[in-house]
Image: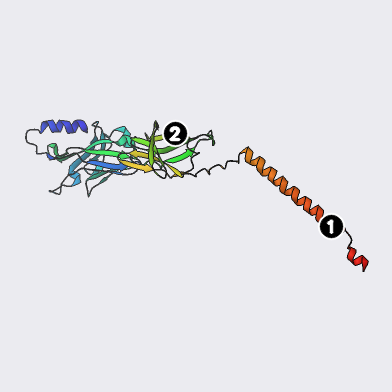
Amino acid sequence: MVTEVMASIAATVMRISIHVIGGAAAAIKTYFNETAYLPCQFINSQNISLDELVVFWQNQEKLVVYELYQGKEKFDNVDPKYKNRNISFDEENWTLRLHNVEIKDQGDYQCFIHHKGPKGLVPSHKMFPPTKLLVIANFSQPEIMEGSNSSSKSYRNLTCSSIQGYPQPEEMYFLLTTENSTIKYSTTMQKSQDNITELYNVSISWSYSGFHDTTNRSIICVLCVSEMCLFSKPYDIAPVPPKTHPPPKDDILWITALSLVIVGVTVFFLVRWKRKKKQPDLSRECQ
């Protein structure tokens, strides 16, 4: 099919009127695993039937993505990696629907239309510039977790992670908020990319040693991708109550001595009162 089209183009160069759509390249953003709509931008002003047309799309590598030959799908010239894909054609809008979009589908797509006449195929439409497809995948909300090897007395190892996103993040950091300030802590971002889906998993780590402070603090993890930032839930840190200092040793001695004196005086008066109570009443005996 491609050889036939190219030969037909070369043979009819002398008096061919090709409808070319010009202007700035249009970019289409589509979410991972959803449907991309690739326009052909063809204005069928003469109401030509699809039975008389050959419509096909090519990617930036000049590989045929889809072909509609005289109103019927044709797979002879479609590249093998697109033959088993879920692809459909919208006749009303002259749009190609690429379902279950993958990261590797990113790139330029171009639509071509040829009119099949008595003398063969005649080019009638070439979309230019091509449509640029951008595929994005939202990262999960960043999550802060405390490492199992953290020491509650001196420091804690905090890790923030986010998964299954694209494109590659630009920045990831911690924000420490206190009563009077907000401080940014940037650390090295660890990245890994899935070999099949090409999605990224990212994380950062931080050893925080300010748990002995006596003020309220909150830590937030921030992940920025393509001018958009995601925020984790706050990791709140309760203030440590101030320690009560024991009185000096001299004060303890004075308090102990005073307590002994009070106890001794109390015992003395109790003993004396009991003895006085046991003595007989002489006035009553004389009577």
Residue extending furthest toward the left: 15
Q: Earlier in the sequence, mark 2 or mark 1?
A: 2
Q: Is residue 187 left or right of residue 245?
A: left
Residue at numbered disc 1 = 276
- Residue nearer the viewer, 72 or 151: 151
- Residue nearer the viewer, 220 or 248: 248
Identity of the residue drawn at 22% across and 48% down: 93
Image quarter (top left, top right, bottom left or bottom right) of the N terminus: top left
Q: Residue 31: give x, y in percent of width and height.
A: 33, 42
Residue at numbered disc 2 = 205
Residue 265 appears in view: yes
Q: Residue 258: give x, y in percent of width and height.
A: 69, 45
Q: Which mark is residue 217?
A: none
Identify the secondary structure beneath mark 2. Answer: strand
| Amino acid type shown at disc 2 | Ser
Other-residue count near label 2 (Cα within 10 Å), few / some / many at <14 / 14–19 / ≥20: many
- Residue nearer the viewer, 130 or 78: 130
Other-residue count near label 1 (Cα within 10 Å), few / some / many at <14 / 14–19 / ≥20: few
Q: Is residue 147 left or right of residue 190?
A: right
Identify the secondary structure beneath mark 1. Answer: helix
Identity of the residue drawn at 84% across and 57% down: 276
Q: Residue 193: give x, y in percent of width and height.
A: 39, 32
64 is higher (above) or lower (below) than 52 = above
